Image (cartoon, grey):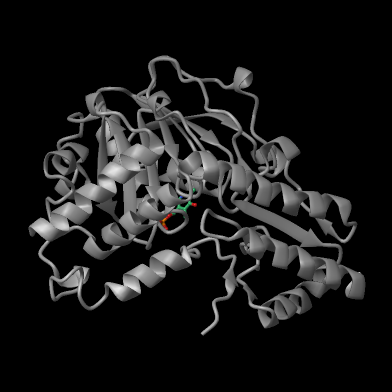
Amino acid sequence: MSRAFNFCAGPATLPEAVLKQARDEMLDWRGTGMSVMEMSHRSDDFISIAETAEKDLRELAGVSDDYAVLFMQGGASSQFATIPLNLLGDKASADYVNTGIWSKKAIAEAKRYGGVNVVASSEDSGFTTIPDQSAWNTHADAAYLHYTPNETIGGLEYDFVPDSGSVPLVADMSSNMLSRPVDVSRFGLIYAGAQKNIGPSGLVVVIIRKDLLGKARKETPTMMNYQVMAENGSMYNTPSTYSWYLAGLVFQWLKEQGGVTAMGEINARKARKLYDFIDTNDFYANPIDPRFRSWMNVPFTLADDALNGAFLNGADARGLLNLQGHRSVGGMRASIYNAMPEAGVDALIQYMTEFAKERG
Ligand SMILES: *Cc1c(COP(=O)(O)O)cnc(C)c1O
């Protein structure tokens, strides 16, 4: 068996050590005679798995007792509706920053539930930069300020946490959660679909400041009510138990790597290597404002689009998989999340060097 380097944007590569542990524990989790998938979510064994995962996430991300941690379902996209339903309260509107395709989806969904003010947008630039915060037209009476710290498709990442004053700051960290240190106390709510940096798809982790609980609209579906989720330990219904377990294994792996500080250093190095190579090789280009280049998702184009097919075929043959860019952007995209080893980035650069020499 050989494992490829999988550059897919999501579902994305998982740490090999995690998959091996899951394999070893598949039929018989620690002498229970059953798989985690087959356990009652009310059993002591599963409760210990769930609580350990939450404790490890709190430790990794530095989440204080002022926050509830929820393991919900429906991916990040269901949060696009869950957030306005729970947080608009008696406010007329919420502020949103538009920096790419995921921002736009969040905005479109929120508009179904209330007023949305797009307070800044980089659409004019083709989403290649982040608008300077001094020019954001934010509202002191907004229910919350929503932004997307890492635009997975465009490869655009904030290098700062916006200052939202007393307005709760809400962040879609689906593709950069736990990739570097972040001061959670700056946020009202953080959410992340699991399939980029945390675990299997379908699971979504929500970190919410407790004073924001209990404001859901009457018509909010019970399953989307943060307070109900918090009061029931995310087990109002049967949670996604196996995904929760796998996320827990990823958190343990991250702790063994030295936590988010160590990951941040490794991720910075991986990204710098790849961007430096792209910038110094005439055959490849990346369109993003260098200050806001994503550490997680690196889009790049070849000098001649007609060579895209040959590039992808050659990459596949070397076990460098899923490098095709998103259909809306074109070109290539290498997603290099926490679980992508530095050796994967090195192998990609080696291949890109040779391809440019032969075909450039
Ligand atoms: C992948 C992604 C989503 C969507 O996640 P789903 O779990 O598929 O709903 C939302 N936001 C960002 C930033 C993403 O990267």
**16 to the left or right of 237:** right
Residue ID at (26%, 65%): 242
Residue ID at (84%, 66%): 353
**263 to the left or right of 195:** right
Percent position of residue 11, x then y = 46, 64
Q: Residue furthest bottom?
A: 1
Instruction: Between residue 331 and residue 283, name the one nearer to us.
Output: 283
Residue ID at (37%, 63%): 200
Percent position of residue 190, x then y = 38, 37
Percent position of residue 127, x then y = 66, 43
Location of residue 307 (image quadrant): bottom right
Residue ID at (56%, 46%): 151
Residue 48, visible in the rendered structure? yes
Percent position of residue 102, x then y = 51, 48
Question: How many callouts does the rendering have?
Answer: 0
Specify the quadrant that holds the C terminus.
bottom right
> Does 322 sit above or below residue 86?
below
